Image: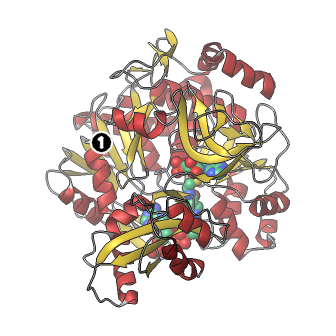
Amino acid sequence: MGYRESYDRSISDPEGYWAEQASAIDWFTPPKQVLVPSEGEDGEPIPRWFGGGVLNTCYNALDRHVIAGRADQPALIYHSAMTDARRTYTYAELLERVAKLAGALTALGVRRGDRVVIYMPMIPEAAMAMLACARLGAIHSVVFGGFAPAELAARIDGAEPKVIISASCGLEPNRVVEYQPILDAALSRTEHQPDHCIVLQRPEARAELTEGRDHDFAELMSAKDIEPAAAVEVEALDPLYILYTSGTTGKPKGIVRDNGGHAVAMSYAMREIYDVGAGEVMFTASDVGWVVGHSFIVYGPLIAGATTILYEGKPVGTPDAAAFWRVVAEHGVKAMFTAPTAIRAIRKVDPDGELLADHDLSTLQTLFLAGERTDPDTLNWAAEKLDIPVVDNWWQTETGWPIAANLRGMEPMPIKAGSPSVPVPGYDVQVLGPDGTELPAGTEGAIAIKLPLPPGTLAGVWGDRQRMVGSYLSAYPGYYATGDGGVIDEDGYVTILGRTDDVINVAGHRLSTGAMEAVIATHPAVAECAVIGVADQLKGQIPRGFVVLKQGKEVDPAELEAALVKLVRDEIGAVAALRRIDVVDGLPKTRSGKILRKTMREIADGKQAVIPSTIEDPSVVEQLRPVLGS
Ligand code: COA
Ligand code: AMP
């Protein structure tokens, strides 16, 4: 079936369409109700998929491939540019380790529905930990290694895990990041305490284990009295994982993904979008702490029976700008996936792409880019140097897989640089005006998706039904609000123009300016503050802060800047990458007191700024212009 026919069918007969796709998954009990409608006030806020179905996600990712004769095929290849290590796990080996780790978790009391927080760097044990949870029907919540204690603590208190799985350290280019002090600091702040922690000791730094609480990962894995665990039967609607993501406020949102819809969506996306099947190799250069890592380092490739590369390192400097090309050539990668920032970083170091010539990239068929907007310049550069299609795809933590893409497995379409191509089947993408009316082609507006969303998208916000409704469903009744603005052209191609809220994207990392403001506001000299995302050539966006001092406070602006930068780094993490904070006399506001961040952003980006008529004092904008423009 071609794209158009497939898309139309997915919208006119979603139940029939997804029931067919569900047959790519091994079910212990097939679904009874393909689409479960949303309920009233207190029930399910959003339609769900595959009610009554019983399966196990880990079984679909591992066991069934071993049973089908792929036992000796590489399932996961760990390639570390940081330690120069390579380790290959066949499907049989990965299954053996995951089953053993699941057995260890069982011995520590973890059962179906319990939560497990995973705070680990890019090592194979991180993927094993995720799969071991899935095997037991336990719900994992992976926390990105670049977050500081406060962010980790918020996620621990949110998920209330029985067990935390961690490692002694992560490796950054200039430093070893010790995780145990971060974990200890987080646990000294949390109300919730886990029953146990499992810590993987890496040679670069050894963690000091706390007697009675901490267990050595390697010891558990070699313990003779721990039985490997079998895959537990779970309901399709049972949560597989929680993944926290930045919202507009300082408090992250725990996006819940369920088992059944996710498994079907992963298998569908691998086949129809990424065109990677059993026995083929996919290299996703991201981190298991982000949704791209969940979907296309761990679950997608394994559910498809493919080989996944788990890469520890950076695109440049570890040791050079050929690091990605080395991975492709060494492992025969067919499809590669990364963030546009990574390509911009490579191009900056190797503008003529000279390093590509040193590596045999003949297996590489497609480069996929997502996580932030791909600027046409970057896309064209990569397409020319690699001489393959470069495919932008647009999605979010909430959806878990692409909303708009060029479906390489279904029907490759012409690529228009600057657009992630067309809505993926299942997503009824609409551009809405402020009053919620659907706008015609070529008109900019808020992008929303008519319900139901397809399988694999968010099932809710963990422990906060109201936030699910308030954040996503109430702005335009009957639609899911994406938080992105954009336009759809006459050919149906979508262009994303950026967030309509205060979420920013720094080097493909989603961050909340609200969270940074909350940290800055705690400083005793600060009366009020605003953080905005401004355009940056390398990272897409970077945050910039503006503070108004409390009356009578005399501080040296450079000292205050240094103190606030450190505060944000300590509280949120180095990834926040907030480096510049200006002291100003006032912030532009509406008469009701709302800070005009959008106007500030437009001026900083050198755009024609829209000054709303509701502004309290237009002279504040004029005073700010020189600072914003500098
Ligand atoms: N653990 C601890 N610290 C981390 C970290 C991690 N997992 N990841 C990043 N950091 C730190 C970095 O060391 C850096 O610290 P520094 O300020 O002391 O130098 C800081 O966070 C900012 O990191 P980053 O935004 O990655 O910037 P960079 O200048 O180090 O590197 C790029 C720039 C472009 C190479 C890098 O951002 C990159 O690889 N981007 C691709 C992002 C990506 O894959 N995103 C996933 C979504 S698809
Ligand atoms: P995250 O939840 O971290 O994946 O971030 C999701 C947000 O990143 C989206 O809401 C967009 O604002 C942005 N984004 C992701 N992919 C793209 C893309 N291909 N083009 C434009 N913006 C994107």
Of helix, strand and loop, which one carries label 1? helix
* Image height of 445 relative to 96, above or below: below
Report x, y in % for residue 145: 41, 59
Q: Image quadrant for the N terminus?
A: top right
Q: Nearer the viewer, residue 570 or 553?
A: 553
Regarding residue 338, the answer to whether it shows in the image is yes
Q: Nearer the viewer, residue 438 or 396?
A: 438
Q: Image quadrant for the C terminus?
A: bottom right
Q: Is residue 500 left or right of residue 350?
A: left
Report x, y in % for residue 404: 68, 39
- Which three-letter amino acid code belongs to the residue tagged 1? Ala
Report x, y in % for residue 425: 68, 28
Q: Is mark 1 within 8 Å of ligand 2?
A: no
Q: Nearer the viewer, residue 280 or 12?
A: 12
For image coordinates 27% across by 69% down, the residue present is 522
Q: For residue 297, which quarter of the picture?
A: top right
Q: Is residue 292 left or right of residue 569?
A: right
* Image height of 297 relative to 540, above or below: above
